[in-house]
Image (cartoon, rainbow, N blue to C red):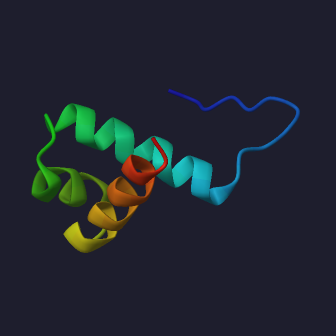
Amino acid sequence: MPLEFHETLPTIHQLTVLLIKEAMKRSLGNLDKASRMLGISRQTILKYVMQEFNRI
Protein backbone atom coordinates (compact mmCIF):
# COMPACT_ATOMS: atom_id res chain seq x y z
CA MET A 1 0.00 0.00 0.00
CA PRO A 2 1.65 3.25 -1.08
CA LEU A 3 1.80 6.13 1.36
CA GLU A 4 0.33 9.42 0.28
CA PHE A 5 1.39 12.73 1.76
CA HIS A 6 -0.37 16.04 1.72
CA GLU A 7 1.26 19.37 0.96
CA THR A 8 2.88 19.54 4.40
CA LEU A 9 5.00 16.55 5.34
CA PRO A 10 4.70 15.07 8.84
CA THR A 11 7.66 15.33 11.16
CA ILE A 12 9.77 12.31 12.07
CA HIS A 13 8.28 12.48 15.58
CA GLN A 14 4.73 12.46 14.18
CA LEU A 15 5.51 9.47 11.96
CA THR A 16 7.18 7.62 14.82
CA VAL A 17 4.19 8.16 17.10
CA LEU A 18 1.81 7.06 14.34
CA LEU A 19 3.79 3.86 13.70
CA ILE A 20 4.05 3.05 17.40
CA LYS A 21 0.31 3.61 17.90
CA GLU A 22 -0.44 1.27 14.99
CA ALA A 23 1.98 -1.38 16.26
CA MET A 24 0.46 -1.14 19.75
CA LYS A 25 -3.00 -1.54 18.24
CA ARG A 26 -1.97 -4.56 16.16
CA SER A 27 -0.17 -6.17 19.10
CA LEU A 28 -3.12 -5.51 21.43
CA GLY A 29 -0.90 -3.39 23.68
CA ASN A 30 1.95 -5.88 23.93
CA LEU A 31 5.17 -3.81 24.03
CA ASP A 32 7.41 -6.76 23.16
CA LYS A 33 5.41 -7.67 20.05
CA ALA A 34 5.08 -4.03 18.99
CA SER A 35 8.82 -3.45 19.34
CA ARG A 36 9.57 -6.54 17.23
CA MET A 37 7.13 -5.35 14.54
CA LEU A 38 8.99 -2.05 14.29
CA GLY A 39 12.51 -3.33 14.83
CA ILE A 40 13.13 -1.05 17.81
CA SER A 41 13.71 -1.71 21.48
CA ARG A 42 10.95 -2.14 24.03
CA GLN A 43 12.48 0.79 25.94
CA THR A 44 12.11 3.08 22.91
CA ILE A 45 8.43 2.22 22.54
CA LEU A 46 7.90 2.68 26.27
CA LYS A 47 9.53 6.13 26.08
CA TYR A 48 7.18 7.25 23.31
CA VAL A 49 4.12 5.73 24.98
CA MET A 50 4.93 7.54 28.23
CA GLN A 51 5.53 10.82 26.39
CA GLU A 52 2.18 10.59 24.62
CA PHE A 53 0.34 9.49 27.79
CA ASN A 54 1.75 12.43 29.74
CA ARG A 55 0.34 14.87 27.15
CA ILE A 56 -3.25 13.91 28.03
Image quarter where the C terminus lies is top left
Q: Is residue 20 visible?
A: yes
Q: In the displayed structure, would residue 46 be above or below residue 29?
A: below
Q: Is residue 15 left or right of 51 when viewed as pictured? A: right
Out of 18 and 1, give the one closest to the viewer.
18
Residue 36 location (% of width, % of height): 19, 59
Q: Quadrant of residue 12?
A: bottom right
| Image location of residue 16, percent across then percent down | 50, 54
Name the foreground residue: 39 vs 25. Answer: 25
Q: Is residue 39 visible?
A: no
Q: Is residue 17 left or right of residue 15?
A: left
Q: Residue at x 78, y 43 (%)?
A: 9
Percent position of residue 20, x then y? 37, 48
- Report how many numbered discs are placed on residues in the image: 0
Q: What residue do we see at 13% from left, 34% from top?
A: 28
Q: Residue at x 16, y 54 (%)?
A: 31
Q: Residue at x 11, y 58 (%)?
A: 32
Image height check: is 29 above or below 7? Answer: below
Give the side of residue 47 with respect to residue 31, left or right: right
Question: Could you tell whether 4 is left or right of 44 in the image?
Answer: right
| 7 or 46: nearer the viewer | 46
Residue 10 position, x and y percent, is: 71, 45
